[in-house]
Image (cartoon, coloured by chain):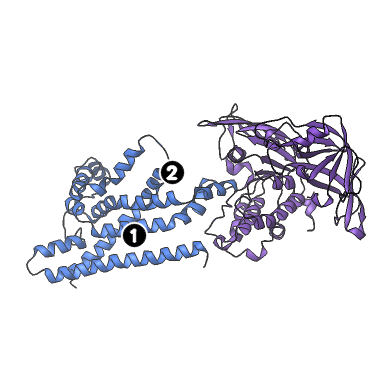
Amino acid sequence: MSPAEIDALMLSLRVAFWSTLWSLPLAMFVAWVLARRQFIGKTLVDALVHMPLVMPPVVMGFLLLMFLGRKGWIGAPLYDWFGVTIAFTWKGAAVASAVMAFPLMVRAIRLSLESMDQGLETAAQTLGAGPVRVFTSITLPLIFPGILTGLVLAFARSLGEFGATITFVSNIPGETRTLPLAIFSLLQTPGGDAAAIRLVAMSAAVAFLALVLSEWTAQRITKRLKGSA
Amino acid sequence: MDGAADYKTPKGVGVIKLDVRRKVGRFTLEARYESSGDVTALFGPSGAGKTMLADMIAGLVRPDRGQINIAGETVFDSDKSINIRPEKRGVGYVFQEGRLFPHISVESNLCYGIARPGPGIEMKFADVVELLGLGPILKRMPHFLSGGERQRVAVGRALLSRPRLLLMDEPLASLDTARRSEILPFLESLRSQFSVPIVYVSHAMDEVARLADYLVLIDEGQVTASGPIGEVLGRLDLPGLGALADVGSILNLALETQIEEDSLSVLTLNGARLVVPALDLPIGTAVRVRVQARDVAIALVRPEKISTLNILAGTITAIEAEHPEKARHQQDVLIDVGAPLRARLTRKSVRDLGLKPGVEAFAVLKAVAVEQR
């Protein structure tokens, strides 16, 4: 494997890792609000969260550029006041991945929140537990399999992100050229097929590994819940 | 258990005073009562609003308006905007389905409420475990418990959170008959040893008659009667009771003598003597028995050469009026034999014997039909 290929792999992992990690708290909050709260405009919020799932990724990339680009509505003050640039950096790639994977994570967590027995939270309450303790000692452990599913889905989605990334942060070797972008570039280059196939195998392996790992963990947790541990 | 007396609260601490109202769709719950017993039963058919009332006491459901007062503290008052959160009310709740936390062991479940104890008396972990027979299952996960074990853990968990009031919502409803009779003795010893005031929600008269000393009748969202259980069960003007197959009387008597050779005991009550299957208790002990109305026969002259051991002289005090819920062939009468005794007769017998208030008669009752509790 060439250093450029290794670079692409490591960059992909880094981007996927940070995008997943940073979107988790927000995804949990949004999932909780959608699962447990009734408010006016809930349908609107729900639709908004799901937009990245149904919009062309290129459009999402363009929107990100409009908002977060150096001259964008949020990007400009960010650069002027803090000197932070997001567009055309690996951080931008992470943001693009996070946005695209967000609905998947929210869906998984929301589903497990909705399927858990809320009576258990009530029971904890009558035993003297305040909202924080109820959440950490009852809700969180019981929805953990759902959180795990959300993490893996989001991680896999990040690894595969192409359209929004190339639109928002371009295809800069070593900075924003993740695995899918590297494969795309190789396919544009005469004689790049062999290297492309190597990268394809690599991304397949990473995705497969993530799935197996999460399935194994989920099974262990379910077993523990059923009490055979 | 040694030192069980430590767990006794002074009488009257368990007083609940409530006056609440809540409307949900076409159903309106309107309840007002004051109870002072160790065990108060909220009794009524399914859908009468019992669970909603229990949820209001625990703070899980908010009344539209009204007041709730537990042991002298106002926990809800719509006029004064008082609404204490459930976790601060100190009300232990045993749910119908147990609601054990599936991801932690029985022991951790039991200990969950110890971290933030309520205002009730402290109970030692070991004592609760012993009373409920939980020792052998402490390390198990809830998934592997039987229905009966699950409910016992739920009771223990609620007790250990130091509640000043223990709410039990049909804790036996999800169990089969065998399991129910396995748990009832635990609940009875709970009642006698821990005297945490208990509010027991049920639609099963046998449970209520065994456990409760104060009865609140609820029907279609309304409290139709409330008072000491003996008094309420002695009323003939309550259609909810008259329609029950297993309604009866509760008598509080004292153990007078033992008839060793026949394995029988004699109980007395205001001069009347009641022979029952032998009770293994010291002479003078207060005994509470339940006599089902359908086990009592009425005679106008003292029957002779009859196998029945209990023939109690008394006066008819009341005859049940006709009401649509009552089976047409039946009629309940009340005979005072020192205490009111309910007898369920055929309408024909009442008519043929000319029973009416003031008539002197004899209550005939088989010794084997008397249930001790």
Q: Can residue B151 be seen in this snapshot? A: yes
Looking at the rendered structure, the kind of residue marked 1 is: Val
Give the letter of the chain under mark 2.
A
Image quarter of residue B208 = top right
Q: Is residue B123 left or right of residue A156?
A: right
Say if mark 1 contacts mark 2, CB within 8 Å: no
The x and y percentages for residue B175 are 61, 54
Badge 2 density bin: few <14, some 14–19, many ≥20, Cα 10 Å: few
Q: Quadrant of the N terminus of chain B?
A: bottom right
* Viewer-side residue, B62 vs B169: B169
Say if labels 1 and 2 share a chain: yes
Chain represented in purple: B
Q: Which residue is mark 1?
A: A152
Q: Secondary structure at mark 1?
A: helix
Looking at the rendered structure, the kind of residue marked 2 is: Arg
Q: Earlier in the sequence, mark 1 or mark 2?
A: 2
Residue A36, labelled with which disc? 2
Q: Is residue A1 left or right of residue B301?
A: left
Q: Colour of chain A?
A: blue
Residue at x 77%, y 39% (from the top left corner): B345
Image quarter of residue B4 = bottom right
Tell which residue pokes out farthest to the top in this image. B79
